[in-house]
Amino acid sequence: MSHIVAIAGSAAEKSKSTDLLRRILTQVEEYGFSTQLLSVRDIPPQELIYGAEKDSPYLKHVTGHIERATGVIIASPVYKASYSGAIKAFLDLLPQKSLAEKIVLPIMTAGTSKHLLAIDYALKPVLSALGATHVLNGLFVSDDLVQKDQYGLLLLDGETEVRLGEQLRSLVSAAGLSSPQKEYESQKY
């Protein structure tokens, strides 16, 4: 079974980007993938800021999931026209080329659509520096495109829902093609 990891880049306990990741992972699981939600909050602040030792159990937990993953979803709120400092500190702890051979779906949430290009000009270059070569277009969601229902669940507007569906299908299709089981089955014939 292929494994998809989502990384929540908000340091806030309650965050639209993290809520969106939870919703996406539920949808990914319906395709038969195993999933894991990781967060910048999984690494103690001391290690996040000053650097984690290579034998850090927190860092080992995170890198272990990323190593096993065929796909990685990275979500961050926009802070000061870029990704969060917490996600940058988190990504800096990862080994070089840790996103190599992974399908990566970048997601950013923001208060306004004025930050639409933050994915392309801020987040994607960092992902490339970590070895990501198969980076999907990504999904940008501004506050005016999302609401919460009476149960606290995210509701996206129609167009954003369509864009999310397209990105999920791309992720699932690409991750499914790169799964070891599918590769083995295609080599049998």
Image: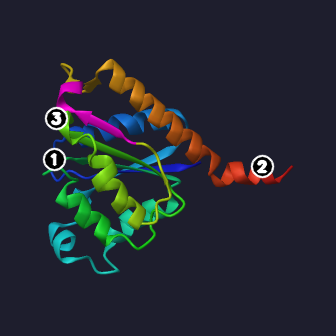
The magenta region covers: 138-145
- Whole-number angstrom distance, CA of label 3 to CA of label 2: 45 Å
| Residue type beneath disc 2 | Ser
Which residue position is annotated with label 1?
13
Quadrant of the rendered structure where residue 58 is?
bottom left
Q: Which mark is residue 110?
A: none
Residue 14 or residue 10, whichever sits in front: 10
Q: Earlier in the sequence, mark 1 or mark 2?
A: 1
Vertical arrangement, residue 93 with respect to residue 171, above or below: below
Vertical arrangement, residue 188 with respect to residue 98, above or below: above
Q: Nearer the viewer, mark 3 or mark 2?
A: 3
Quadrant of the rendered structure where residue 153 is?
top left
Q: Quick check: 99 left or right of 185?
A: left
Q: Nearer the viewer, mark 1 or mark 2?
A: 2
Q: Earlier in the sequence, mark 3 or mark 2?
A: 3
Q: Quick check: 32 left or right of 124?
A: right
Residue 17 placement (x, y as % from top left): 25, 41
For label 2, the SS is helix
Q: Is residue 149 visible?
A: yes
Q: Alpha-carbon neighbours of circle 3 within 10 Å: few (<14), some, or many (≥20)?
A: few
Residue 30 inside the magenta-drawn segment: no
Residue in view at x 44 percent, y 29 percent? 165
Residue in view at x 68 percent, y 51 percent? 181
Which residue position is annotated with label 3?
112
- Whole-number angstrom distance, CA of label 3 to CA of label 1: 21 Å
Which residue position is annotated with label 2?
186
Residue 125 placement (x, y as % from top left): 35, 60
Residue 139 inside the magenta-drawn segment: yes
Q: Nearer the viewer, mark 3 or mark 1?
A: 3
| Residue type beneath disc 3 | Thr
CB contact under 8 Å: marks 3 and 2: no
| Residue type beneath disc 1 | Glu
